[in-house]
Amino acid sequence: MDRFDYVIAGGGLVGLACAIEFSHMGLRGLLFDQGAEPKAPPAIGHAEIVNHQLLNAGSPRVSAINPASIQFLDRLGWRSNYSDAGLSPFSEMLVWDGEGGGDLGFPAEGLIIENDRLRWALHQVAKALVQAGRLVCRWQTGIQDVEDAADGVSLRLTSDEAISAELMVAADGARSKTRDLLGIRTLSWQYNQTAIAGVIATGRPHGQVARQCFTPDGPLAFLPLPEPDQNVIVWSSTKNDERLNLSPSALCAEIEKYAEGALGHVRAVGPLAHFPLQQQQAHRYVGKASVLVGDAAHSIHPLAGQGLNLGFADVKALAAALQKTRLGSKRGLTAALQVYQGQRRPLNLRMMATTELLKRVFDPPSPALRLARNIGLRWLDSQSRLKQALTLAASGHM
């Protein structure tokens, strides 16, 4: 039976980041994922417009990463494998009500990145660690069973390999099989919304501003891309099944309606991604020698755009807690995992509660609530200290 300092289930963005961070701490580990090994993303090309359809545009699966996450990624060494041409900085956030005159603007620095390109960049860092003998990766490999004990974990992979480790990290997403095998229950609730995401081309440049409109059936985000006339839209809505059947020109017209002239004429839209929305929180984040991070521990509505940032913050907090102990020490590991859970679970719950409150405030309201909402947005826009607090929260430093 092979023995490692740690084993990570899940080779997504959070799992890869965790493996690299742990390797920097001098630990040797195993990462496995039931999916295929990441492939190099296509070269960044020039998009074309044909009959309101945007062809050869980038992927609509993007994330907004805040300064705290950028600093963390810089420490991991991602930039040497990620082309600057694929980075889109933003410096401001504008929010408005699609059914009224209330709006709010505040500074909010960060980067819009394509998830697949970031995963490829982290994978290249991980491959260097594999070549150095500090990491083992198993792709197209899942987990069959796991035994979680105070002196470490023992697991069997779908390849029939038997593995033991001092610590197991579940980073295998919102539908984590590892979490289920560990017997950790979740509290989750479905929204009556799905999300669509796609790249649009507009008549006016975005000016490196991220925007969000609260439409009658759900929030519509505009995330700036490297091309000044392109944005990714993420529309969380009760009517997206209908929108998937619209012609490109009709969909462009509907998006343009809620952009309220900020981006000019919406000229084209690319292929749409479509996914359900839910919010979920694990009852506990830790076991005897196991721990949940990222979506395996918590998943939130994309309204706040903080999902990936929360996952990276989990990894940072876990690494910091482990640095104060020594793997192999039962008492030390137990204490470190409790410190991690005590730090991250309340913060993640607070973000989830804030997101849920925002969603409820901007759900289709009565006329009286709509009026109060617009007055509230105008008032908040006039409060410099509160806007400063929003800026700090968006940067990941609160």
Image: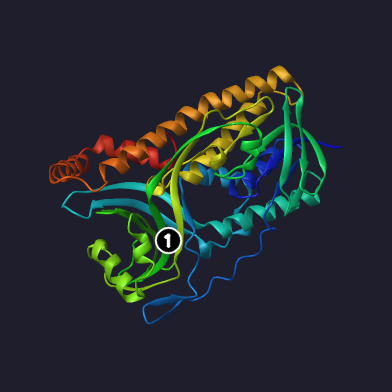
Determine the residue located farthest toward the top in the rendered image: 331
Specify the quadrant that holds the N terminus: top right
Count numbered badges in the picture.
1
Is residue 241 shown to the viewer in this render?
Answer: yes
Toward the viewer: 96 or 277? 277
Q: Is residue 222 left or right of residue 379?
A: right
Toward the viewer: 291 or 14? 291
In the figure, residue 269 lies in which quadrant? bottom left
Question: Against 379, is 322 above or below?
Answer: above
Q: Is residue 43 left or right of residue 250?
A: right
Toward the viewer: 33 or 283? 283
Is residue 26 shown to the viewer in this render?
Answer: no
Q: Amino acid at mark 1?
A: Ala
Determine the residue located farthest toward the bottom in the rendered image: 50
Specify the quadrant that holds the C terminus: top left
Secondary structure beneath dot 1 equals: strand
**What residue is at 75 percent from the left and 27 percent from the top?**
152
**What residue is at 45 percent from the left and 70 percent from the top?**
271
Question: Against 42, is 211 above or below?
Answer: above
| Mark 1 Cα shell of 10 Å, populated few (<14), some (14-19), many (≥20) | many
Residue 36: x and y in percent read 69, 58
Residue denoted by label 1:
197
Toward the viewer: 353 or 83? 353
**What residue is at 51 percent from the left and 30 percent from the top?**
344
Residue 287: x and y in percent read 64, 27
Residue 370: x and y in percent read 17, 46
Question: Against 184, is 63 above or below?
Answer: below
Residue 32: x and y in percent read 72, 47
Q: Is residue 305 left or right of residue 34?
A: left
